[in-house]
Image: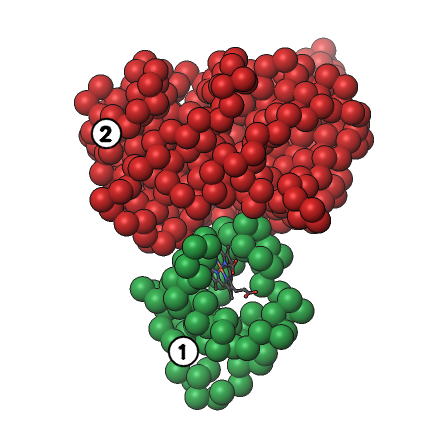
Amino acid sequence: MAAIAADITLQRQDELLYLLHQDCGSCHGMTLKGGLGPPLLPQVLQDKPVELLSATILFGRPSTPMPPWSFMLNADEATWLAKHLKGQAHD
Amino acid sequence: MIKFLSLIVVAVFSLSLPAAEPRGTGDMGIIIERANGSVLIIETTHNSQLYRVEGLGDLSHASAVFSRDERHAYVFGRDGGLSKIDLLSGTLLKRVMQAGNSIGGAISQDGKIIAVSNYEPGGVKLFDSTSLELLSDIPAHYAESKQSKTVGLVDAPNQHFVFSLFEGNQIWLLDAHNPKQPKIQKFADIGLQPYDALISSNGRFYIAGLFGEEGLALLDLWQLDKGVQRILPHYGKDDPKKPVYKMPHLEGWALTDDYALFPAVGRNDVLVADRRTWQLVKKIPVYGQPVFVMSRPDGRQVWVNFAMPNNDTVQIIDTLKLAVMTTKKIGKGVLHMEFTPRGEAVWLSVRDEDKVQIYGTEDGQLRGELPAHKPSGIFFAARAHQSGL
């Protein structure tokens, strides 16, 4: 896990958090309590594996409004976001 | 000495009456600062900020309507908060938490009822516009133990409201003459996943955009027996839908003498429909996926903003030629646009640059700029006198 955090610079982490609250927030709510998309809070996601969540972020969910983000996020970044959403420490 | 005394009198007078000059509110409006839970109260005559009002909660995706005297703004927050603001004093008069998660609202024709559209629990609630007391709760049950998010809530003539059910694929028409026991007429199977809706400025046509399939659902409120018609059913048949990074909005009915313009979902097009037959006339290729397609009040221009990663640009469509005439780079995160009541200027919120820009619409020149913290929606008080806004 340390490797993952180390791969993502602090500046990039800031950008990811900005993206999460502003742009993901347009569907999931700026505080991630849900909107058109479901809430993305640790208590809601606790039973969902990181792999599932990061795949959802990268590839979207067909026939739902959840879009794929692989055009701007790589796998490490999606994993970092998924862990962040689950409230897991990154280091 | 007399001069000295009168100075003191003036000083005392102005201390007790800080808002010296009485003023109207017709040139006022609010700007949502989505990250801070605050709104700015501004005026469009000198393009200045008058107040900042704080404590409104989570305002991502917030919207507002105005009382019929244009004195008060009602702000609908994402977190289910309904706030009433006094534009003249710049104060938050009242705030109620009315749901867990809400999307927008409307004010009745007579100005007495505020309706709020909720995601969680899915449904609509009616409130007294003076006291913000709950009048009735209308859960959006569409099948056994299934409750839908509601979207596209607007007011309509004869003390009605209209809204759509995102999961329920329905349109409900609410007769609120008796707001404690509103009557509901339901239209089912209107198309998959209506995501937003609008009503024509005369209050006749209610149109819901569909996310789950191509086309839009149209209800003619003058001829309810005709039911819901599907319009523009195959607008993207040669052009597969792409992922959508921000849901488009159907607000600010873009209407010219002959045409209605809509954002296409998941495509880089603005759709043009004939207003009489509702047939697709043209697809205007644009810079990105359109979010707002808004007509200047006279209908001569239509301004379009876009979903990320193209949200640094707006385009202006010439409505005679039905083609893009200007492409403007504005700045990162253009989220919303609002025209002054007679359309000589347009205000744009530029979220990532923490400012609002004001352009003249005749020459397209920048006329001014105001700092604002993560601005999103801009709403002018003149909306008070337009049905559906």
The image position of residue B302, as x and y in percent, is 32, 27
Frontmost of labels 2 and 1 is 2
Residue bearing the label numbered 2? B282
Q: Is residue B56 above or below residue A33?
A: above
Residue with the mark numbered 1 = A76
Q: Residue at x 61, y 70 (%)?
A: A45
Return the x and y of residue A9 as percentages of the image width and height: 40, 77
Furthest residue to the bottom?
A2
Observer able to see residue B344 = no
The answer to whether one can see residue B142 in this image is yes
When the figure is inspected, residue A25 is found, relative to residue B247, above or below; the finding is below
Q: Amino acid at mark 2?
A: Lys
**Chain corresponding to green in the figure:** A
Among the 4 quarters of the image, the one containing residue B287: top left
Q: Residue at x 47, y 42 (%)?
A: B192
Q: CA distance from mark 2 to mark 1?
A: 43 Å
Which residue is more in the foreground, A17 or B190?
B190
The subunit letter for the residue under badge 1 reads A
Q: Which mark is residue B225?
A: none
Q: Judge left or right: residue B33 versus residue B53.
A: left
The chain coloured red in the image: B
* Front residue of this view, candidates A50 and B143: B143
| Relative horizontal placement of residue A14, taking residue B79 as reference (left or right) | left
Is residue A64 placed above or below B279 in the rendered structure?
A: below
Indicate the chain on which mark 2 is placed.
B
Residue visible at 53% across and 81% down? A90
Q: Quadrant of residue B142?
A: top right
